[in-house]
Amino acid sequence: MNYLDYIVIVVYLAGFLGLGFLFKENNSGGDYFLGGRKTSWLPLSLSAMATQLSAISFISAPAFVGLKDGGGMQWLTYEFGVPLAMAFLLIALLPTLYKSGIVSVYEYLEKRFDASSRLLISFVFQISRSVATGVMVYTMALILQATIQLDFWISILIIGLITMVYSFQGGMKAVIWGDVIQMGILFLGIVICLYYGFGELGGIDNFLTHVDQDRITAVDFGKWGFNNADGNDEFGFWPMVIGGFFLYASYYGTDQTQSQRLLSSSSMSNLKKLMMANGLLRFPFTLTYCIMGLVLGTLLLQDVSFQEQMETVYQANIGSLQGKKADLMVPVFIIKYLPNGVIGILIVAIMSAAMSTLSSTVNSLSAVTMEDFVKRFNPGMSDKKYMGYSRLLSIFWGLVCLFFAFFAGNIEGTVIEVINKISSVFYGPILAAFILAILTKRTHALGANIGIVVGVLFNIYLWLYVPQIFWFWWNALGCLVTILVALAVSFTIKRKANEGLEVVYYAGKKEVAILAAYFIAIVLFSISLPNILN
């Protein structure tokens, strides 16, 4: 890196400091946490994608595709459950949640069950999301330290403080439009890597000649994920479709970082467009960075100097990067092959992706804490006091995430797998709570709470003692166990169940048909991928 790269980075960071000032006019919780419900579907969709497809996708997913043992284009199967989950949410859950007018999605659980259910899920969300975000920032800081010699603590402080400043000032509007900019930078970074990667390989034809044939198979119908102790029985078609359905239904429908965007939509019509965009646009984006992983992995095998530089960086930082060598592929490629100025843009892409996830987490954690805890003890507070507390909470949660980043410690495997494992422990039981709340009438609060706790403990047991079961199944199994236990307790212990708010169903036959057809199309495309690349 030289002065030109540093200028690019400084200008970018200064621009984001100004972003918070641009959107500083927030007069109520609806403004600060939901953007006044005036944002159209396209920026909301890009913001949702930027949060999900962030730094770990830019660095760790291509590493999985290009380098990791047992990796390859089977990463595409992560996307199979997305359109099905979007269809389910459009029909069953989101219309009710949107019409309720809530800020924290967990507020609905109190209206249907009681305060204990709301606070239990809210607490689980706050702990799991802050830890997972801390792990992500930790890993990005390690990679920046290893490749551009930016001290670990400086990387964390730069990413964290800039994000906290514009989130503190601008709230959800700053987060959304910041994500839109960061999504554009991230996609530009992938295109740049592809362009230079193909150039170093001598063109697409040479890439197709030398690509590892074992890595281009995306779909395997023979792997069920129940014999996973050796780590080789993963990413089969059925666990990825079924487990992915439960994961994404929970993530987009009941995780505050995503549902807050859905609740920010200006109308049900815009909400439908937002869900369709999430269902249709994720796969092409994922396909693009997976191909980038194949290209860079192929280049690594062809270029000994690339291997040597990556090994040198790894050995120099082996104490902190133990088990994460593959995650160095993209940043080492950037430093080795890209010209100055462009290097700065790509480093900005890494930083912007990390900042996108952090800003969304901070805003969502603040919203949940404010609505689920603080407001409970002072329900009649003025808008001015509400805004003051909300901004202070954004700083608090930013510091909590950075705390976890500093003390995340060593993690094994690519970081994207670790974060998804953490999430998969909780996603199924949380989704089950909302299914029970909206789609059943006899489930009461005690049954729901016991079911949630048993579902989470069951998934933790699978993680610790049943490695044979691939972790993607935890999303489905945790959800089913929670529902069964909750129903059993509710039928055994007689208590009156609250009716909650009116349940709203959306008969979106056209949207559901499109999403179902799209699911079939991406599966058929993925099956035929080896023929396309040969």
Image: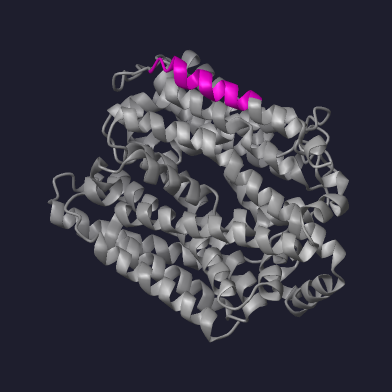
Q: Quadrant of the C terminus?
A: top right
442 or 188, which lies in front? Answer: 188
In screen coordinates, is 458 left or right of 366?
right
User: In this picture, is 244 found above or below 90?
Assistant: below
User: In this picture, is 95 found above or below 32?
Assistant: above
In screen coordinates, is 238 left or right of 274?
right
State the image coordinates of residue 107 (x, y, percent, origin top left).
32, 36
Q: Quadrant of the N terminus?
A: bottom right
State the image coordinates of residue 331 (x, y, percent, origin top left).
66, 68
Q: Residue at x 51, y 81 (%)?
A: 6
**Residue 143 picture quarter:** bottom right
In screen coordinates, is 510 left or right of 505?
right
Coloring scheme used: one colour
Number of numbered discs present? 0
Q: Residue at x 44, y 39 (%)?
A: 121
Q: Which residues are magenta?
A: 506-520
Magenta region's main secondary structure?
Answer: helix
Q: Residue furthest bottom?
A: 3
**Residue 341 picture quarter:** bottom right
State the image coordinates of residue 255 (x, y, percent, origin top left).
45, 41
Q: Residue at x 43, y 24 (%)?
A: 90
User: In this picture, is 86 found above or below 205?
Assistant: above
Residue 177 is covered by the magenta coloring: no
User: In this picture, is 466 found above or below 312?
Assistant: above
Q: Residue at x 53, y 75 (%)?
A: 155
State the image coordinates of residue 437 (x, y, percent, origin top left).
41, 24
